[in-house]
Amino acid sequence: MAEVEQILTEAAEMERRVALVREQEQAMRDVLPQRFEVNMAAFRRFVPSIAERFEQYRIQRPFEMFCTDNGIPNLRWRDDDSTFYGEDPYQECLQQVELTLSSSTIIRFNLDVEGDWIGQQHIKYMNALVRQMKALQAEHPLMEQIPESMPLGLMFGVGLGYQLAYLYERCQIANLYLFEPNEDLFYASLHAFDWAPLLEYLHSQNMGLHIFLGQQEDEVLTAFREVSEKRSPFLCSTAFGLVHYRSEVLQGLVGKVAREMFFISMGWGFFDDTLFSLSQSLNNMEAGVPFFRRDVALPVEWRHVPVFIVANGPSFDRSVELIRQHQDKAIVIACGTAVTALHKAGICPDIYLAVERITSVPASLRSIGDPEYLQRILCIGPDVLHPECRDLFRDRIYGFKGDEPMFSLLFANTELMQQYRKFAFINPLVGNIGVSLPLHLGFDNLYLLGLDNGYRSAEHHHSKYSFYYDDKGETKNEFKQMALAQGDCVLPANFGGEVISNRLFAASVLMMEVALSHFPHAQCHNCSDGAAIQGAMPLPLEALDLADFPVLDKSELRRFLLEQMSAPVPISRAEVADYMDQTFFSMLLARVKTDWETMPTSRLDLIQLMQKQMEYLSQVALSRQRHISQVLYGTFNSLFTLITHLAYSISDEQQALAAVDSLRPTMQLFFDTISRLYPHGLQLIQGQHQAVYRQALEE
């Protein structure tokens, strides 16, 4: 009898639970569409692009929403009957957030004192601030877990969104970058999670949320790069990550976003460097150097000729005889110090390329000790090349570097830039202009020789023909510790396996890949025994065959480039000086200094102050004075990276803010120095700049 009663009791309980589930399911079916409409209205207001994307959305992988026993909406995929969360989605999300905040490592950029053989004000003040920062960190307990606020959070996977509420309850995130490759899941979250109050809260607190959707990785990474560079790159210097769920697509994205974050932190430039570029560009224009014209195209008969892009990597040594054999059938381009290796091998290139603006470039050319040799070569480079370079060559043609302030200044204030070409994708190393320049000029049959971006042996990091080695083939002492000889990562090799490389070479490879992707019609053959380059087809040296190509009349090409495809730039120093707009620059710096007169009272306020000042530059970038944004962009990002690093390394918030406060006198001196140097910004030729510095800072 007792067993019967137990069965009846269990049946009654089951019936009650079934009735409850039915009730919950019905309530869910009533609520989910209403929540979707409220959320869509909020997205229309705050993020219209997201609302537009899901107005008429069609599900790719069928799913259904159902209630767990505790009434929480969950998702079930219909194709395999798997559920997204377990029995308690809320608890699952809460535990994940708590674990992340208590045990995740904060992603940081390393900051250290830099060497400076040139003598630049940016490095002088940044080194002083780094020393102060390290001393302050030594005085206080350091942060061991994610604190009450963070500059940047990276969330990979939205799921149904429940974790967002728990995350913001526990941490004020100044900027959250949210990646969701599965648009079905995001669509489901619009029904399950209350996005509307979250968006309202973020708007009221001036906190940023950037959502990157879809499985097109290239598009997602491009959007991420653009948002990061616009919003404030310094944010990437102090961040944390949370992976909400596991998938192969998401895991692949995590690695690529981490790689992008490193590249975003590179190549900011800084104040002195941008003034060198302005001064040297103007000096080159005043000297009458012809610049590539935009309205003249390369003749069809030259577009398909072989172009040898020769760099100074270790595999150059095995390319020498091939270059010698085919030099009359190919345009031979020497990238930077490859010209020294070619000279030693008895080969004269047709074109020499340089990209750096410092005196070491002309110094390396003079070290060849053969002025007549250089006179036979056409020198091509960006407008910012050091003026001493042009005096070493009879023929030279420059092009405007698109990401430098002179191009922006002339583009915003004159009609000249409609007539002249700009170069893109030419950083961070000279090999990048080696790939980019021929593509921009219209050549579409490229061969990469010695462009290794890595090496098989640390003792063989450049060609043995180059000036990095002595007559015995041993590395000269002065070059043993140079940056490009230091390996800190490995890259996939062009012909299989891996090569020793470093992050600068890796950045160079990435930019070459970007350049090639913009010229899909071009054929690029990678004959170098170095790093693989996406978009460049591996081609062993022994397979390179130019038997069917004719001998070239290279003098005809040179005449065309010099007489038809290039022309001097008709601009005066007085015009450029007027466009510099010293008054506006002074007003902007005064505003920045005033903002720092009052110290923020929280770490979040500190981040938002620095973001506000980066927003000043974003607004200036849309104006006639856009070059000023470029002049300050790198220095502001470097300074704000250091401040963020200090604020989020000391555990106690008030001690951290006091430490930042102690940097303000040095920062104000830095701002004052920048203000006093800018009026002399067209007189700062690198190597001659110290006299101008002394004059400006004594005034």
Image (spheres, rainbow, N blue to C red):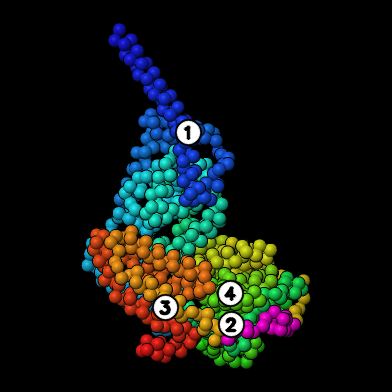
**Looking at the picture, how far across and down is residue 387, in whole percent?**
54, 87
User: What residue does disc 3 label?
Assistant: 586
Is residue 71 placed above or below 200 in the rendered structure? above
Residue indicated by mark 2:
339
Q: Position of residue 263 (x, y in %)?
A: 47, 65
The answer to whether residue 516 is visible is yes
Secondary element at tag 2: helix
Tell me what residue is drawn at x 40 percent, y 21 percent: 19
Work out how far the residue at label 1 is from the one at label 2, CA to CA, in angstroms. 66 Å
Along the line of sight, the residue nearer the viewer: 29 or 444: 29
Residue type at mark 3 is Ser
Q: Is residue 474 visible?
A: no
Could you tell me residue 180's position as x and y percent? 49, 48
Give the image location of residue 570, x and y in percent: 63, 84
Q: CA distance from mark 2 to mark 3?
A: 44 Å
**Of helix, strand and loop, which one carries label 4?**
helix
* Residue behind mark 4: 411
Q: Magenta region: which residues? A: 555-573
